[in-house]
Structures are given as structure tokens and as C-alpha cells.
Image (cartoon, rainbow, N blue to C red):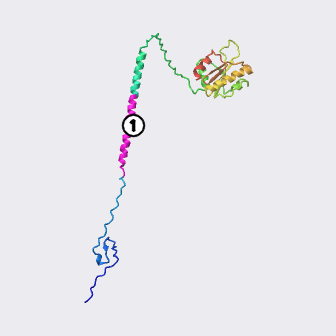
């Protein structure tokens, strides 16, 4: 009788191998019914979705609108309170009796109409001499360009030089034989220089005395002109007043 053969099973289970496509390859036919474990579930992210930026815009618009409404309501309330205060003040002051006052006589003063000057603003000493002749004066011994220093025999010093000058004599006040009066007119760049020369001549008249053969000349200043030696009531002063601007 032949002995019975029993199949020998392995004492160590066969470990399945995984291929690249996820299938299980078995090394033993005894474990052909092996079922592989299920694959792990996919990773699920639990982060909340990002908020939409439009929500912030809506919130900002809502806040700005609320601020505008509050400001408008405050402004209307302020106007209402002020108007009530003004009304109350008007009511209080209206109860005070009004004392009539004497009416003031308003005298309308006539508007002065400026006269149009016919004087030449760019006049020279020669122009003024022509005006003297036109007015009826007949100056004699006319000399142009002489300074006050030389005309006064080196006695009166003026620090500002005139732009033009004319010295002459006048015998209109002579009755019979007499020495004619010595006169002179000096034209400066502006009225300020003419007035400065006027004060310097006046100081020299006080400190240095009269000019030899001439005396102490009368001074008259107007506009840009300094007139020496003429009477303040003479026609020379009248012409200088009109033409020396």
C-alpha cells in the first residue's frame, strides 16, 4: 500500500506586491482569492473659500452713506436752531420802544471836475522862458546852463544838479534909471529834487547871507522848478505855477 501524500502548505503567508498601476501581483496560487485593501480617500481641504472683495465695497459704501445722512441731519438741526434763535431775538427786540431821532440834513457836495493841464510834462528852462515872453514879460540878458553856485558868486551850494536852467534880468519894476533885478529858474528831474534845492538855498541864505550885487533872492518852488529872485506876486510866479508841473 502506497503512503498517502498530503499537500504541504507554507507556514509563512505570501506578501502581495503592488505594481505601478495599483494591481496586486500574487506569488502563490494558494492566495489567488486575496482581496486588496481599498485605497485611501482623497484629501479634502477644510479651508473656507476666500471672501469676495465686493462685500467690503458694499460695507464701505454703506458706512459713507450713513455718515452723510448723519452730517446732513446735524446741519439741518443747526439751521433750525439758529433760525429759532433769530426769531426769538427779533421778538424780544421788537418790544423795545423806538425813540425817534432828529433827521440829519445831507448836503451833497459837488464833485470837483479835474482841469486838464496844457503844460508840457517834458518842459525845460527854455520852454519856461518862452512862456514868460508869451505872458508879456521881456527878460533881458538871458543865459542858459548856469548853476546856482556860479550865479550866487560861489556862495550858495546845491548838491543836486538841475537838468536845465536860465538866468536873466527884469526891469519891469524900474521907474527911471535903476539896476534890473537878477532872476533865475532851475528845472530838476522831479519835484523832490526841486524841493531839496529849495531848502539848501534857504539854509545858505541864513548861514552865508546875501549875494553880492544881488541881495537875498526870494525863493519859489513848484513842480520841478525852483525860481529865485522874483516877487511872489509877480507874473513870473503865476507862469511858474501854471507851467511847472
Residues shaded magenta = 50-77
Residue in view at x 41 percent, y 22 percent: 86
Residue identifier under label 1 = 67
Q: Residue furthest bottom?
A: 1
Q: Is residue 66 left or right of residue 175?
A: left
For residue 216, what is the image quadrant? top right
Q: In the picture shown, does residue 34 fall above or below 147?
A: below
Q: Residue furthest left?
A: 1
Q: Is residue 111 left or right of residue 184?
A: left
* Residue 85, horizontal then vertical, whole percent: 41, 22
**Residue nearest the viewer, comparing 32 with 244:** 32
Q: How would you classify the magenta stretch by its main secondary structure? A: helix
For residue 87, what is the image quadrant? top left
**Residue nearest the viewer, comparing 41 with 224:** 41
Whether residue 186 is visible to the viewer of this picture, yes or no, is: no
Q: In the picture shown, does residue 59 fall above or below 115?
A: below
* Residue 145, horizontal then vertical, whole percent: 66, 27
Residue in view at x 41 percent, y 18 percent: 90
**Residue nearest the viewer, comparing 142 with 59:** 59
Within 10 angstroms of label 1, few (less than 14), some, or many (20 or more) residues?
few
For residue 190, what is the image quadrant? top right
Q: Is residue 182 within the magenta segment?
A: no
Query: Is the C terminus in the top left, top right, bottom left or bottom right quadrant?
Result: top right
Query: Is the N terminus in the top left, top right, bottom left or bottom right quadrant?
Result: bottom left
Whether residue 193 is visible to the viewer of this picture, yes or no, is: yes
Element on which disc 1 rests:
helix
* Residue 205, horizontal then vertical, whole percent: 71, 20
Residue in view at x 63 percent, y 21 percent: 221
Amino acid at each position: 500500500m502506497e503512503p498517502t501524500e498530503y499537500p504541504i502548505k507554507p507556514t509563512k503567508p505570501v506578501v502581495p506586491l503592488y505594481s505601478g498601476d495599483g494591481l496586486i501581483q500574487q506569488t502563490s496560487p494558494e492566495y489567488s482569492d486575496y482581496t486588496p485593501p481599498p485605497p485611501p480617500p482623497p484629501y479634502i481641504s477644510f479651508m473656507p473659500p476666500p471672501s469676495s472683495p465686493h462685500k467690503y465695497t458694499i460695507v464701505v459704501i454703506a458706512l459713507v452713506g450713513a455718515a452723510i445722512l448723519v452730517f446732513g441731519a446735524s446741519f439741518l438741526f443747526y439751521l433750525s436752531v439758529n433760525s429759532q434763535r433769530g426769531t426769538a431775538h427779533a421778538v424780544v427786540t421788537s418790544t423795545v420802544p423806538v425813540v425817534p431821532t432828529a433827521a440829519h440834513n445831507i448836503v451833497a457836495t459837488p464833485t470837483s471836475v479835474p482841469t486838464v493841464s496844457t503844460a508840457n510834462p517834458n518842459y525845460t528852462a527854455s520852454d519856461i522862458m518862452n512862456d514868460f515872453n508869451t505872458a508879456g514879460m521881456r527878460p533881458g540878458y538871458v543865459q542858459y546852463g548856469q548853476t546856482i553856485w556860479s550865479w550866487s558868486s560861489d556862495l550858495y551850494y546845491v548838491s543836486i544838479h538841475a537838468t536845465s536852467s536860465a538866468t536873466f534880468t527884469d526891469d519891469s519894476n524900474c521907474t527911471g534909471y535903476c539896476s534890473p533885478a537878477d532872476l533865475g529858474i532851475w528845472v530838476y528831474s522831479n519835484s523832490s529834487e526841486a524841493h531839496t534845492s529849495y531848502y539848501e538855498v534857504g539854509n545858505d541864505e541864513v548861514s552865508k547871507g546875501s549875494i553880492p550885487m544881488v541881495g537875498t533872492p526870494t525863493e519859489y518852488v513848484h513842480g520841478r522848478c525852483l525860481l529865485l529872485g522874483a516877487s511872489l506876486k509877480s507874473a513870473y510866479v503865476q507862469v511858474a505855477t501854471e507851467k511847472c508841473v
